[in-house]
Image (spheres, rainbow, N blue to C red):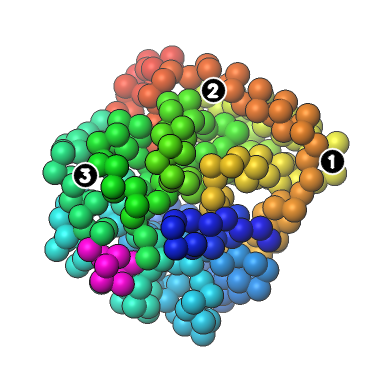
């Protein structure tokens, strides 16, 4: 396993993080057996993965982790969770954090993230206000001073959101967790990566395999397996068929190197210097093993460059400002990509 350093205090995180949305969200991912999840967590921690990501919005994920992690030394684990909602004042944020800590059976988290900025065009009733940004900074700073968190982080924040924070906020807000893969690079094209780099922030890349699209297991004309895929623009036509060109190249490279397509796609993400960790969500020890092996995979530079080129060509076919998730603006989003409803 390889590791990255987050923040000024040297928070050391594995290049692969275990994502746990599927652990607790039955509605989105179906039911899980506790013993199966225990095997996944044990395998991760036994094989160099020290970074686990969850959220209060992931169903019973926090409670499940509280049970599964209680026999491990707390200092050996980097634990991240997220707060949702629309209020970011100190009292609200601390109250929500304390509930998360109780569910996780710990007295602090290493990284406490704002799950989403308020965006009216998605699923919020209002957009972010100037006060919201100051509240986020102030709340995270106080919680850090109180020892309840080591750092604060953001998630799904676009460029115009980041620019609203005062510079001093980035001393405590050290990461931005965003969807980032060979088939989703809007945060890069928009300038988020350059801005984060300038402010000393690193990315946590979620959905590095595009919810399974980059494994090659889903073919054009097929049906999504999970509700979350139905809400993902990548699984809607004509985007899916356009993205398949990238998937085909990933499969070709994998065949030439005698590895899995998922490993090729994941390695590309890990190779990006702005990415502190790629978050892989799995309930399968076999898949987790493949993901971990991708860290040490040696892919010749010409293959990575070729994948980068094909990836950007696909990205250029999509309108700027598109969100990966389809929310309240479903009709508007689909019309943007050429579908009339």
* Residue 257 numbered tag: 1
The percent position of residue 160, horizontal first and vertical second, equals 30, 31
Q: Are marks 1 and 2 in contact (CB under 8 Å)?
A: no
Residue 337 against residue 6 in the figure, above or below: above
Query: Where is residue 284 shown, x and y percent of the image?
Result: 63, 62
Disc number placed over residue 25 in the picture, else none: none
- Name the residue carrying label 3: 133
> Residue sitting at 43 percent across and 18 percent down?
319
Q: Quadrant of the N terminus?
A: bottom right
Q: Residue at x 37, y 78 (%)?
A: 106
Q: Secondary structure at mark 1?
A: helix
Q: Is residue 263 visible?
A: yes
Q: CA distance from mark 1 to mark 2?
A: 25 Å
Q: Residues within 10 Å of mark 1 (few under 14, many from 20)?
A: some
Magenta extent: 142-149
Judged from the image, the secondary structure of the residue bearing numbered disc 3 is: helix
Do residues under tags 2 and 3 come within 8 Å of each other at their CB atoms?
Answer: no
Crowding around mark 3 (Cα neighbors within 10 Å: few <14, some 14 to 19, many 20+) is many
Q: Nearer the viewer, mark 1 or mark 3?
A: 3
Distance from disc 1 to disc 3, alpha carbons, whole Å, reads 46 Å
Of helix, strand and loop, which one carries label 2?
helix
Q: Residue at x 52, y 16 (%)?
A: 317
Residue 173 colored magenta?
Answer: no
Residue 114, image x and y in percent?
31, 52
Choose between 181 and 146: the one closer to the eye.
146
| Mark toward the viewer: 2 or 3 | 3
In this picture, residue 134 sits left or right of residue 16 = left
Q: Which numbered tag is attached to residue 315?
A: 2
Q: Quadrant of residue 42?
A: bottom right
* CA separation in Å, label 2 and label 3: 30 Å
């Amino acid at each position: 396993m390889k590791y990255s350093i987050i923040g000024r205090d040297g928070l050391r995180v594995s290049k692969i993080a275990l994502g746990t949305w599927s652990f607790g969200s039955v509605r989105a991912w179906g039911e899980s057996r506790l013993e199966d999840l225990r095997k996944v967590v044990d395998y991760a921690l036994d094989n160099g993965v020290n970074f686990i990501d969850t959220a209060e919005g992931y169903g019973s994920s926090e409670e499940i982790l509280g049970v599964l992690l209680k026999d491990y030394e707390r200092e050996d684990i980097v634990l991240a969770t997220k707060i949702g909602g629309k209020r970011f004042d100190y009292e609200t944020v601390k109250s929500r954090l304390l509930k998360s800590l109780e569910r996780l059976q710990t007295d602090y988290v290493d990284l406490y993230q704002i799950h989403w900025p308020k965006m009216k065009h998605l699923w919020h009733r209002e957009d972010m206000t100037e006060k919201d940004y100051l509240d986020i900074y102030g709340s995270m700073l106080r919680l850090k001073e109180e020892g309840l968190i080591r750092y604060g982080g953001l998630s799904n924040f676009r460029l115009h959101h980041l620019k609203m924070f005062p510079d001093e906020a980035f001393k405590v807000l050290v990461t931005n967790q965003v969807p980032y893969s060979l088939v989703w690079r809007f945060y890069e094209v928009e300038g988020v990566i350059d801005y984060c780099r300038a402010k000393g922030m690193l990315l946590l890349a979620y959905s590095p395999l595009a919810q399974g699209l980059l494994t090659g297991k889903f073919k054009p004309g097929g049906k999504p397996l999970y509700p979350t895929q139905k809400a993902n623009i990548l699984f809607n036509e004509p985007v899916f068929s356009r993205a398949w060109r990238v998937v085909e190249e990933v499969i070709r490279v994998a065949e030439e190197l005698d590895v899995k397509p998922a490993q090729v796609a994941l390695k590309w993400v890990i190779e990006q210097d702005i990415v502190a960790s790629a978050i892989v969500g799995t309930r399968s020890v076999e898949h987790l093993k493949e993901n971990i092996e991708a860290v040490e995979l040696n892919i010749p530079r010409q293959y990575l460059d070729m994948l980068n080129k094909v990836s950007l060509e696909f990205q250029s076919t999509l309108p700027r400002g598109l969100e990966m998730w389809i929310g309240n603006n479903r009709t508007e989003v689909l019309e943007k990509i050429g579908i009339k409803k």
